[in-house]
């Protein structure tokens, strides 16, 4: 538990340092991209849904898996689509 | 050994997330950064699947295909103007997933064969806290995001919805959530195998889920359209915190690290948005500030105090712009509504042909989400080195011949500088009034989101071009070409 908390705090600090330097122009892609990263819950969903044994755990885990995959795949794809449009003057 | 490999894989993916986000610091490297983060996700998923030898039943494959396909369709189909609501919806999916994973974890603790599944572990007090927090944050994110989605896509009114006792009810629900957590805490470790729904832990979990869902709705309905950038950023942060909370539930570092990164990112954006409006987060969350406006309404040219505005025409604007040496465009939400971004780009190009220096000034809270205007202009092929942030460009208005305001209002209201009675007093604004001439494209004289009159419109060097922004710009382009 304490280790987890330490990891959480350190990661938050790294996140703040990295993200505070992102320019305003990229705030929307930052949001959708970081949102896709938060779809990391997919890993949790896989663990829970994969450990078959209890039907309830599986159903709920399955639903979680669908939501999380939508989040991850959609999030990264739409971010890519947006970033592709940001061009310098030729 | 196996656990070590997984942990190393999670470390690798965390590093890829961090460097992926770092590359978002410049538009030139941003796309690679996003791809790197996506690869990081692949590493985390692959490690979980293959190394841990989780059984891979058909259902799991179905889950990935259904979810992935759905996400891909949404991502491909969405119009750039629909981006705010899509981001809100994705936040909601993330929140729902976190809440569900925590729910599934309870089901595993409760299963008759729990001893095998959990390696003999029983649900302890800490488990109860992390699980209930994960469900609560996840559900608040889920329903809050979908209310935001409804408001942004126009399915629900963008006006703030406030009724007497709203705050009292919210506080009562928060207390209810705490009570349910205590209830779960007391029930933890002692399971009645007899009934699933009659188990106190399950009852508490369901109660927390319902309370979280209601709280999410109550949190977002009082907030008006103009404050949406703050809400979208805040929900983004919640979706990260929900993932981190799930990481605590599962003792999974990948979830904790990524969740923390996203949580921090959302909080920073929230903070930037609040500062750009000179309001505290608390003040925004209380809500009731500004709704949808600038819709239909009588176009009048006389204010309540009897001040008059100068109305102008497309050909006059065309002459003014063509003979200027420097023009700054100031886009706002009205440009998004009128879908005028392509016309604006064309006008900018026509002016550039006539050796006019053209720049774009973007206020941090213009639009409905952080960076909204930048995405629209990028879609219309405006190079990003023509877009300038408020602090970079504000000094340049002094030397600008014409500032063209397209569908922006409160962010260019000089009252924010000096009128202490104004609700937007102290909000940093774009100094459009410092330009030699300002032109405001607007559908009518209706006030902006803050519901207040804009002093700029009554300045002697300001001219109003009434009408739909897209039509007006198209007319101006034709006149410029004809010159």
Image: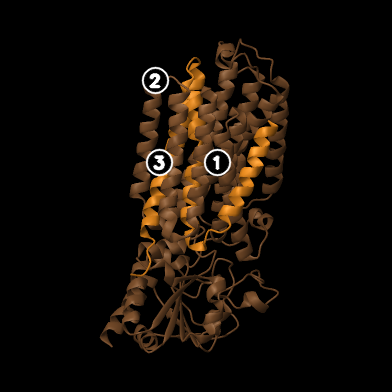
Crowd tier of the residue under label 1, counting other residues whose Cα lies within 10 Å: few below 14, some 14–19, many 20 or above: many
Give the drawing colour for chain B: brown
* Chain identifier for the orange-coloured part of the image: A
Give the structural element (helix, strand or loop) at label 1. Answer: helix
Residue at 62 percent of width and 13 percent of height:
B120
Give the label, 1 or 2, closer to the camera. 1
Please tell me which residue lies in front, B40 or B464: B40
Q: Position of residue B349 (x, y in %)?
A: 33, 76
Q: Are marks 3 and 2 on the same chain?
A: no
Give the structural element (helix, strand or loop) at label 3. Answer: helix
Give the structural element (helix, strand or loop) at label 2. Answer: loop
Residue marked by disc 3: A73
- Picture quadrant of residue B215: top right
Please tell me which residue lies in front, B220 or B82: B82
Residue at 73 percent of width and 22 percent of height:
B186
Residue marked by disc 2: B57
Residue marked by disc 1: B258
């Amino acid at each position: 538990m304490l280790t987890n908390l330490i990891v959480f705090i350190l990661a938050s600090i790294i996140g703040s340092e990295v993200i505070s330097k992102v320019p305003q122009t990229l705030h929307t892609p930052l949001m959708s991209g970081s949102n896709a990263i938060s779809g990391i819950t997919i890993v949790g969903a896989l663990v829970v849904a994969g450990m078959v044994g209890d039907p309830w755990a599986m159903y709920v885990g399955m639903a979680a898996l669908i939501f999380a995959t939508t989040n991850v795949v959609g999030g990264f794809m739409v971010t890519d689509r947006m970033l592709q449009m940001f061009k310098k003057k030729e | 050994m196996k656990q070590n490999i997984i942990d190393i894989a999670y470390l690798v993916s965390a590093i890829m997330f961090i460097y992926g986000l770092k590359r978002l610091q410049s538009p030139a490297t941003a796309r690679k950064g996003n791809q790197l983060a996506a690869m990081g996700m692949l590493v985390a998923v692959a490690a979980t699947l293959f190394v841990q030898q989780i059984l891979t039943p058909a259902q799991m494959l179905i889950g990935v295909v259904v979810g992935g396909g759905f996400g891909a369709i949404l991502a491909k189909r969405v119009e750039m103007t629909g981006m705010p609501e899509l981001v809100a919806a994705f936040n909601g999916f993330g929140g729902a997933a976190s809440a569900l994973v925590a729910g599934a974890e309870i089901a595993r603790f409760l299963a008759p064969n729990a001893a095998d599944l959990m390696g003999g572990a029983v649900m302890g007090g800490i488990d109860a806290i992390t699980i209930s927090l994960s469900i609560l944050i996840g559900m608040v994110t889920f329903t809050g995001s979908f209310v935001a989605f409804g408001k942004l896509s126009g399915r629900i009114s963008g006006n703030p919805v406030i009724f007497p006792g709203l705050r009292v009810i919210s506080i009562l629900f928060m207390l209810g959530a705490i009570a349910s957590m205590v209830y779960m805490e007391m029930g933890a470790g002692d399971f009645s195998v007899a009934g699933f729904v009659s188990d106190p832990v399950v009852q508490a979990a369901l109660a927390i889920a319902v309370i979280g869902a209601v709280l999410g709705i109550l949190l977002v309905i009082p907030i008006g359209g103009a404050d949406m950038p703050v809400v979208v950023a805040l929900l983004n942060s919640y979706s990260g915190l929900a993932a981190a909370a799930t990481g605590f539930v599962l003792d999974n570092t990948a979830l904790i690290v990524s969740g923390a990164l996203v949580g921090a990112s959302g909080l920073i954006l929230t903070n930037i948005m609040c500062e750009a409006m000179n309001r505290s987060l608390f003040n925004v969350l209380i809500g009731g500030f500004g709704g949808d406006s600038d819709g239909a309404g009588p176009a009048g040219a006389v204010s309540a105090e009897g001040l008059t505005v100068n109305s102008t025409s497309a050909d006059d604007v065309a002459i003014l712009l063509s003979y200027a040496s420097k023009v700054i465009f100031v886009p706002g939400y009205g440009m998004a509504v009128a879908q005028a971004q392509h016309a604006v780009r064309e006008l900018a190009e026509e002016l550039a042909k006539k050796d006019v220096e053209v720049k774009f000034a973007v206020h941090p809270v213009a639009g409905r989400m952080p960076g909204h205007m930048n995405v629209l202009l990028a879609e219309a092929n405006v190079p990003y080195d023509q877009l300038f942030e408020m602090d970079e460009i504000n000094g340049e208005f002094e030397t600008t011949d014409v500032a063209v305001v397209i569908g922006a209002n409160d962010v260019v209201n000089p009252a924010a500088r000096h009128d202490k009675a104004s609700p937007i007093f102290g909000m940093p604004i774009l100094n459009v009034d410092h330009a030699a001439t300002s032109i405001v494209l607007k559908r009518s004289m209706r006030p902006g989101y803050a519901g207040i009159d804009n002093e700029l419109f009554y300045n002697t060097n300001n001219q109003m071009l009434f009408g739909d922004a897209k039509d007006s710009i198209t007319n101006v382009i034709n006149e410029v070409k004809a010159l």
